[in-house]
Image (cartoon, rainbow, N blue to C red):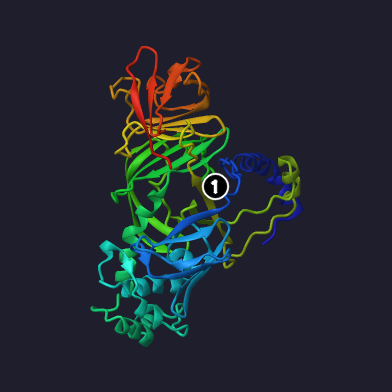
Amino acid sequence: MKLNHQTSKKVWVFLSSALIIGLSSCSDSQEPKFSKAPLKGPTTGILTDAAPVAGVAYTTSSGSSGTTDTQGMYRYNHGDNVKFQLGELIIGDIKATGIVTPIELAAGNENKLQNLPVLLQSLDSDNDLSNGILIPAEAAAALKPTLNLSSDPVSFANSAILKTARDAAGLFGDIKSAEAASTDFLARGINLLSSHIWVKYDDTNASVIRVAADGSGQYLQGEATADDSCDENRVCGGGTIIKAGVEYGIANASQFDTRGFNLNSSSSVDTNLRAGLSHPRPTWRIHTNGDELIISDIVVAQRAREQSGVFGELFHIARPIELSSDDEPILTEIKEKRYAKMDNNASGIVGAWALDQNSVKTKLFLFFPNNKFMLIDPIGTTFQSEQVECGTPGVEFASYAYDTNSKTLNMRSFIYDTNGGCIGFSSSSDKPISFDISANGNTAVLSKQGEASITLYRVSK
């Protein structure tokens, strides 16, 4: 149906007030944006499934070639493409990245994503994933390009070529089922995220994710962001659903597809409301290629704004409204958030520093190269772990200046301070703080006037 011109005038007052609010507050929320120069030169990456994969041949667009070693390592130059191959079977021809899993190799093909773990795990030399996956040369040589990685997973597991490859290497046991192979790949999902501390930041906002490397699934997330009442579809209500704060909990991967892993999370500290990992939607996914951490979700596609200003847009859409048919599908799109590795100057202050080097549930101090600082505090105690009434778990986000000669740190212009205002750096604003970095750059002694010194440990790399 259509609303005629007379009817549209009657609702103009309502639409004007509603849409001014909608257009001004429910556009994309302020995402941190800080661009980095592209990396150049030689580097290494890891090929992994449920475990690092050895015995896979590779060639890169810059001319590097070889076979992945027991750590799954391959060599390439930043910007390369890489081709992975078992015998005559190409299992992936993709952009080279720091971590390559079946998700990258599948390149959006769901069947291939299900079949790759079956292939790699079924060709392991000793059928023991705890010591990695080693594909014997005899098994690789027996694989032919007629083995269709995109075929139905049930048919793939019964492929004669796959059985021939196993027989050629004298492998014992049965071919892995798609369910068993997927379960083993899922078990590694959360640990893949621990390769780095992941950050998104600019001069006014920051978001940080850290995952424990011990397989426990412990994670720490900090958000320095303005209050937001709009959800993932930019539908806005009266209450705040995202705010600056900290989250600590335990997560595990529950399923995966070509966009990444879905997590089950349980948080014991959560002051950022729905901003963290504790409220993933069914269509929410997370994964890393070793160079970036990518969070994606399927959301309702936003109508492109026709006019640059809010009032211009209001006049543009004031024409008669056409209501969609109930049968018309809702247009959706994939929205991504991309996190980079935390910057790290091995001999300088830039990097991430922890109060306890063996725990994720500890104060995390992040000094960014744009002279912004963030403290993520899941504990809410003083630097000396003393309880105080004014202290709560939270975050600080401010500007800093560091003098390498005097080893003096100055904090100023706090944009966010949600941890009580008496246990972080905000109480020392504009007062010099000693930050003495060790000769090897791995530790630093922090001293505030009137307080005992503490040792911080560099946890970025």
Rendered location of residue 277, percent (x, y):
40, 47
Q: 165 above or below 307?
A: below
Q: Amino acid at mark 1?
A: Val
Confirm whether residue 409 shows in the render: yes
Q: Is residue 93 left or right of residue 460?
A: right
Rendered location of residue 326, percent (x, y):
57, 65
Q: Is residue 436 left or right of residue 332?
A: left
Confirm whether residue 232 shows in the render: no
Q: Is residue 310 left or right of residue 385?
A: right
Residue at x 43% of width, y 19% of height: 434
Residue at x 28% of width, y 22% of height: 387
Rendered location of residue 276, percent (x, y):
42, 43
Q: How many other residues sit within 10 Å of disc 1, few (<14), some (14-19) or many (≥20)? A: few
Q: 387 above or below 97?
A: above
Q: Quadrant of residue 391?
A: top left
Q: Quadrant of the C terminus?
A: top left
Q: Quadrant of the N terminus?
A: bottom right
Q: Total number of numbered labels?
A: 1
Residue sticking out furthest to the left: 173
Rendered location of residue 318, percent (x, y):
73, 49
Q: Which residue is mark 1?
A: 235
Q: 21 above or below 393?
A: below
Residue sticking out furthest to the top: 450
